[in-house]
Amino acid sequence: MKATKGNKVYTIDETQKAMYQAQGYDIVDEEGKIIQYGAGKTVSYEEYKALEEKITKLTTENKKLKDEIKELKKGAN
């Protein structure tokens, strides 16, 4: 497995995983998939609000489309 942070990549074993994660390194398996995210990661408030608004919009749109599907299924029967 590997520990990555920015452009730094270290090959580590299971015993070193916790230490590198505590220092903010992401732990990646041999296939490149992230196993665990490093500590101390943050998201800016602006990015958080933008994502929150997007979730609200998509949730509303999803509900509307589900209701539309129900109506179409009723009409088809």
Image (spheres, rainbow, N blue to C red):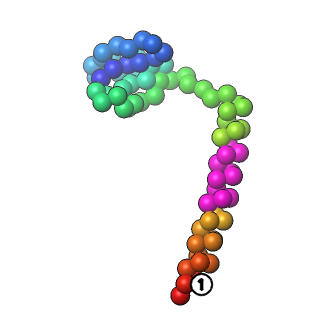
Q: Residue at x 36, y 32 (%)?
A: 33
- How many neighbours does mark 1 have within 10 angstroms: few (below 14), some (14-19), or many (20 or more)? few
Residue 48 versus residue 54: which sits nearer the camera? 54
Quadrant in the picture for the N terminus: top left
Can see residue 22? no
Residue 24: x and y in percent read: 48, 19
- Which residue extends farthest front? 76
Q: Amino acid at mark 1?
A: Gly
As drawn, is 32 to the left or to the right of 68? Answer: left
Q: How many marks?
A: 1
In the shown orientation, is residue 77 left or right of residue 31?
right
The majority secondary structure of the magenta stretch comes to helix
Residue 47's spot in the image, x, y percent? 67, 33
Up the image or down, 42 lies above or below 59; here it is: above
Magenta range: 52-62
Residue at the outermost bottom position: 77
Query: Of helix, strand and loop, which one carries label 1?
Result: helix
The picture places residue 52, in percent across and down from the top left corner, at: 68, 43
Q: Nearer the viewer, residue 6 or 13?
A: 6
Question: In the drawing, does residue 25 fall left or right of residue 12?
Answer: right
Which residue does the image show at 41% across and 18% down from the upper left?
A: 4
Q: Which residue is mark 1?
A: 75
Magenta stretch contains residue 57: yes
| Residue ID at (59%, 68%) | 66
Q: Is residue 11 magenta?
A: no
The foreground one among 19 and 51 is 51
Q: Residue 26, image x and y in percent?
A: 43, 23
Question: Which residue is located at x 30 percent, y 30 percent?
Answer: 31
Q: Quadrant of residue 17?
A: top left
Residue 63 falls in image quadrant: bottom right
Q: Nearer the viewer, residue 3 or 72?
A: 72
Report if residue 61 is visible in the image. yes
